[in-house]
Amino acid sequence: MLTRIVKMQFESAFTEDFKIIFKEVKPLIANFEGCLGVKLLQHETASDIFFTISYWENAMALEKYRNSALFKNTWLKVKINFASKAEAWSLIEQ
C-alpha cells in the first residue's frame, strides 16, 4: 500500500471554495480504481493550509489517477489559487 500526502496552501479567499470542490470530488477519488481511501485535513491554526491523504494499492494505481481527467480537471481548478507551491510525498509503511 502507498500513502500519498499532499500539502497545499491557498489564497485565503479560496479556502471555502476548495472545501466545496474537495467535497464534490472526494467520492470520485475514493471510487477510483486502486484508491483505498482519501481524506482532507486543515491545519489547526493556519486555515489556508490543507493536506490530502490518500491510500493506494500501489504506485501504478496512483500514477493512473494522476494521469486521469479527474485529477487534471480538479488540479486546474485549484492550482491557480495556490499561495505557495504544493508539496507531495509518497510513503510506504514499514
Image (tube, rainbow, N blue to C red):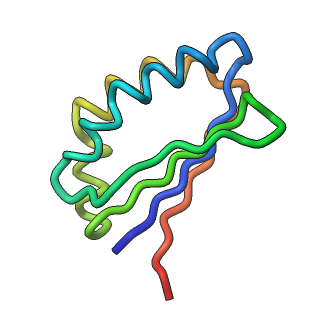
Residue that protrudes farthest toward the left in the picture: 33
Picture mark count: 0
Q: Is residue 15 depicted above or below 85 in this figure? A: above
Q: Is residue 34 depicted above or below 17 in this figure? A: below
Residue 74, image x, y percentages:
37, 26
At a point 77% along the width and 42% down the height, the residue shown is 44
Residue 30, image x, y percentages:
28, 46
Residue that protrudes farthest toward the top in the picture: 13
At a point 62% along the width and 45% down the height, the residue shown is 7
- Front residue of 23/91: it is 23
Residue 48, image x, y percentages:
72, 28
Q: Is residue 48 depicted above or below 2 in this figure? A: above
Q: From the image, which quarter does the N terminus lie in?
A: bottom left
Residue that protrudes farthest toward the bottom in the picture: 94
At a point 37% along the width and 61% down the height, the residue shown is 55
Q: Is residue 41 left or right of residue 55?
A: right
Q: Is residue 45 left or right of residue 40?
A: right
At a point 54% along the width and 14% down the height, the residue shown is 17
Residue that protrudes farthest toward the right in the picture: 45
Residue 32, image x, y percentages:
20, 47
Q: Is residue 37 depicted above or below 9 in this figure? A: below
